[in-house]
Image: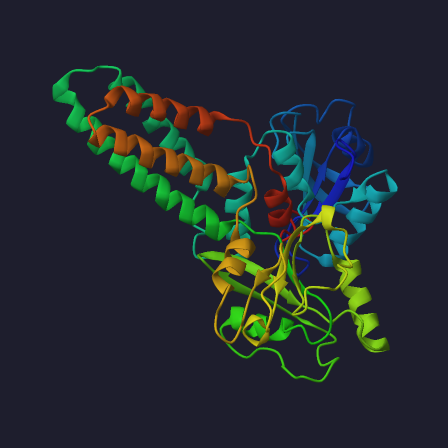
Amino acid sequence: MEKQNELIVALATPEAVSAISLVRLSGRGASKTVEKLMRLKPGRLTGRKRAVGDLAGIDYIVAISWPRGKSYTGEEMVDLMCHGSPGTARRILEELENSGARVAVPGEFTRRAWLNGRLTALDVLTLSEKYKGGSEAESDLSEELNELKSEIEGLIEFSEDHEISGEEQVKVLMRRLLKKAEILVLKVKRAEILPRVFLMGPVNAGKSTLFNKLMGEETVVVSSTPGTTRDGAVRTVSLSGRNVEICDTAGCGGESLDSKALEIVMGSLKSGDRIVWMDPLCVSEICVQAEDHELLKVCSKADQQEKSAKAGWMPVSSDTGEGIEEVIKFITAPEKESPSWRLERMADLFKEAVKASEYQDMALAAEIVSEIFREAEKPERCGDAVERALERFCVGK
């Protein structure tokens, strides 16, 4: 993780000819750095200010500053608007780098906004959807959750009045809010990026066959000849309403090229990636650090085995479909404390509240609704989903 408040800079507009280019600077000392380069009086850009003038003899620019706590990132920040020439913007970037700033990594401005409490996890997921042009790009997930929370709070106040005449209205409200929560769960699931899934194991374990099964089409070549899969294949597929990136890999114990291909895969693994380890004999040594990954051990080609799978191994057959649903559940399971995990918990509690109200136990229903509100108000804990969303962003976002 990059150091917070370190001065970072990036081009926030496309590197192409346009009317205006925008260079963004964020972190401690942003205003002083620009004041010095524009030869302004000290403090000229302190707070929310605007200045027009020459920057280091490169271009006549407009500088707009924001104080800490009021900017997009939550840090001291300055936006520099110059003429829309890639060469001009590039020279300004170089001048700022020479003055102590470093070029931001993709999504770093938004990451700082999230870490500084300017954005929620759901805000980041919404931005990620807009950035990739997804079908849910128009939805503001954080705003929808806040509306839901407000209605839950109103329901709590309403349900405290235990007059019989109001019970039916409470039931109607709870059923409506349950539906609203379930719709929000689906939207968040589509926006949330799950951990990558790697199909791994010894050669001829059936990895490519399972890969094709999950894709719903023949995407990679399947052969009984060891070493057929070397470069592997990576595809994003929609499973159970969630988009998952699945990676086919070369087998362990193969020839030199297989070994090299597997080495490349091992180098690309990140903490939190999920591993489906496949072995029809259930005897191979797992060559990844299991504590760094969620791991599912699969006894593949189960329909061809005379003996049942060993304890701890799930029998799976890509031909008969045995165990495929269990594999999909493992692949698409939400991470604990992730936005979708928390929203699903809220929806499940709503179902309990609706059920209690139907049995005329309004006191229990009110208690469960209060628990839903407490769940909605809990601080965010899981940042992995946010970090994966941020990987989609450009350098200047």
Q: Nearer the viewer, residue 193 or 229?
A: 229
Q: Residue at x 80, y 51 (%)?
A: 91
Quarter of the image for residue 116 reads top right
Q: Along the line of sight, which residue is nearer the eye, 72 or 175?
A: 175
Identify the residue shown where x is 85% and y is 38%: 100
Query: Residue 329: where, in percent of width, then height?
Result: 50, 55
Q: Quadrant of the N terminus?
A: top right
Is 316 left or right of 247, judged from the image as shown? left
Rendered location of residue 305, percent (x, y): 59, 73
Q: From the viewer's perspective, is residue 305 above or below residue 155? A: below
Instruction: Tell me the colour scheme of the image.
Output: rainbow
Q: Could you tell whether 38 is left or right of 301 in the image?
A: right
User: In the image, 365: left or right of 307?
Assistant: left
Give the total of numbered labels.
0
Residue 138, how many percent across, how many down? 42, 49
Q: Relative to 252, is 337 above or below?
A: above
**Which residue occupies 56% across, 51% down?**
193
